[in-house]
Amino acid sequence: MSDKTDKNAKKEITLSPETLAISSKLLPHLKLVDGAVAPIPAEAIIETLPEDVTAEMYQKVEQHRNQFFAGASHAMIEFSSAEMAKDKSIASLEASFPMFGRDHFDVNVDRKRQFTVGDKPPVTQWCVLDAAYVVHGARTKVGELSKVKAYGRDVGEKILAVLAD
């Protein structure tokens, strides 16, 4: 017998109590309808909030976040249109607004875009905005979500792989 550990042996996956508590609160909201997951009610997230965070606090933060997105986008249109008016070579400008953690809100403004709908002549739109909220906090390669993914693979191996035979 060797003192070396088996490199192929699986490590036990330990999820945080917070993850398991949130999961237990969300699980009753998951329903299968016609082979697909039914829409999850909006109040489900409220049920998962920490004890010291009220629904009103959460809703206020959500409202601010939405207003922030609109305000940041407006600021980028104002800035981009002024800069593009000064320098005709600028075709596009992008800004990344930091959010909490590693998340960010990205706003891109294109000088112009042409769209064709059906057989109608092309339509030109000026100062065209695209925006996206980029979530890095979930971090699928490290952290708690990576453990949940590994747990899912283990569950799949134990339950679903057996059914595949």
Image: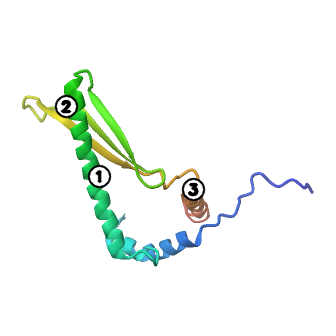
72 in relation to 47, above or below: above
Q: Residue 32, how many percent across, how many down?
A: 37, 70
Which residue in the structure is indicated by mark 1?
69
**The image quarter in which residue 127 lies:** top left
**Mark 3 closeness class: few <14, some 14–19, many ≥20 residues within 10 Å:** some
Which mark is drawn over residue 113? Answer: 2
Q: CA distance from mark 3 to mark 2?
A: 39 Å
Q: Earlier in the sequence, mark 3 or mark 2?
A: 2
Q: Nearer the viewer, mark 3 or mark 1?
A: 1
**The image quarter in which residue 1 lies:** bottom right
**Mark 2 closeness class: few <14, some 14–19, many ≥20 residues within 10 Å:** few
- Outermost residue on the right side: it is 1
Which residue in the structure is indicated by mark 3?
146
Kindly identify the residue that appears in the image at 25 percent across and 51 percent down.
Answer: 70
**Amino acid of disc 2:** Arg
**The image quarter in which residue 95 lies:** top left
Q: Nearer the viewer, residue 112 or 12?
A: 112
Q: Nearer the viewer, mark 1 or mark 2?
A: 1
